[in-house]
Structure formats: C-alpha cells, structure tokens
Image: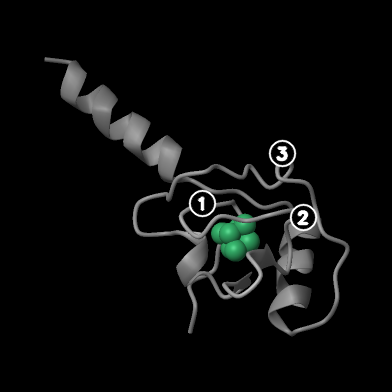
Amino acid sequence: MVQPLLDVAVIGVTALVVLTIAEKALQNKAARGEPVRKVSKKKAQYQTSPKGRQACYNCQFYSDSDRTCDIVRGDIAPQAWSKFYVKEK
Ligand code: SF4
C-alpha cells in the first residue's frame, strides 16, 4: 500500500539535478561560447549512460567530431550524461 508512494518519491529525487550558483555560472559562460575551466567527470556527476532522453550527443556542449565537452574534461562518450546537460537547440 505504501510502496507506490515511495516509488514516486524516488523518481522525483533521482530526476532532480541541482547546480550550485558557481556551476550555473560556469554553464552560462560555456553557453555563451566563452572559454571555461573544465571540471572533472566526478564533479560533473558524469555517467556512461544517458539519463532518460538526455545524452551527450544531444547536449549543446558536446562536440561529436572529437568526443569533447565544453565543460567536462576528458573523452566524452555520446551516450554519456552529466549534470551540466542542456538540450541542443
Ligand atoms: S551532458 Fe555533460 S558531459 Fe555530456 S556534453 Fe553535456 S555537459 Fe558535457
């Protein structure tokens, strides 16, 4: 009887992405095309699988030609995801 309510609560929490003010400023700067000091995958909560429909290949910060991201350091897989995701326009 209580289980369905718990399931809804868990879905809500896992879908929640919180950026600090500094992280949001970094994201905005990258969105304007300005160079930023990239963050580690760990700090970006990078994961190697998509988060629902959100994946690097459809994120505005992803460069498919060289598998890089404007915000996160290192080799970035097209099917990965991080908390800095913004849907490509
Ligand atoms: S989802 Fe994150 S790691 Fe992937 S391209 Fe976007 S900002 Fe970079």
Lower position in the chain sequence, tag 1 or tag 3: 3
- In this rendering, is residue 82 above or below 66? above
The image position of residue 59, as x and y in percent, is: 52, 69
Residue at mark 3: 42
Q: Mark 1 and mark 3 in contact? Answer it, CB < 8 Å.
A: no
- In this rendering, is residue 87 above or below 54? below
- Distance from disc 3 to disc 2, alpha carbons, whole Å, reads 10 Å
Q: Is residue 84 visible?
A: no
In this orientation, which residue lies closer to the viewer: 84 or 68? 68
Ligand 1 within 8 angstroms of badge 3 C-beta: no
- In this rendering, is residue 41 above or below 85? above
- Circle 2 packing at 10 Å, graded few (<14), some (14-19), many (20+), is some
Q: Amino acid at mark 2?
A: Arg
Ligand 1 within 8 angstroms of badge 2 C-beta: no
For residue 80, the mark is 1
The image position of residue 81, as x and y in percent, is: 53, 52
User: Which residue is located at x 78 percent, y 76 percent?
Assistant: 29
Q: Quadrant of residue 6?
A: top left
Ligand 1 within 8 angstroms of badge 1 C-beta: yes
From the viewer's perspective, tell me whether residue 10 is left or right of residue 21. left
User: Which residue is located at x 51 percent, y 51 percent?
Assistant: 80
User: Which residue is located at x 66 percent, y 52 percent?
Assistant: 19
For residue 73, the mark is 2
Q: Is residue 17 visible?
A: yes
Of badges 1 and 3, the one in the foreground is 1
User: Does dot 3 land on a helix, a strand or a loop?
Assistant: loop
User: Does dot 2 land on a helix, a strand or a loop?
Assistant: loop
Lower position in the chain sequence, tag 3 or tag 2: 3
Q: Quadrant of the N terminus?
A: top left
- Distance from disc 1 to disc 2, alpha carbons, whole Å, reads 13 Å
Query: In what quadrant does ligand 1 lie?
Result: bottom right
- Circle 1 packing at 10 Å, graded few (<14), some (14-19), many (20+), is some
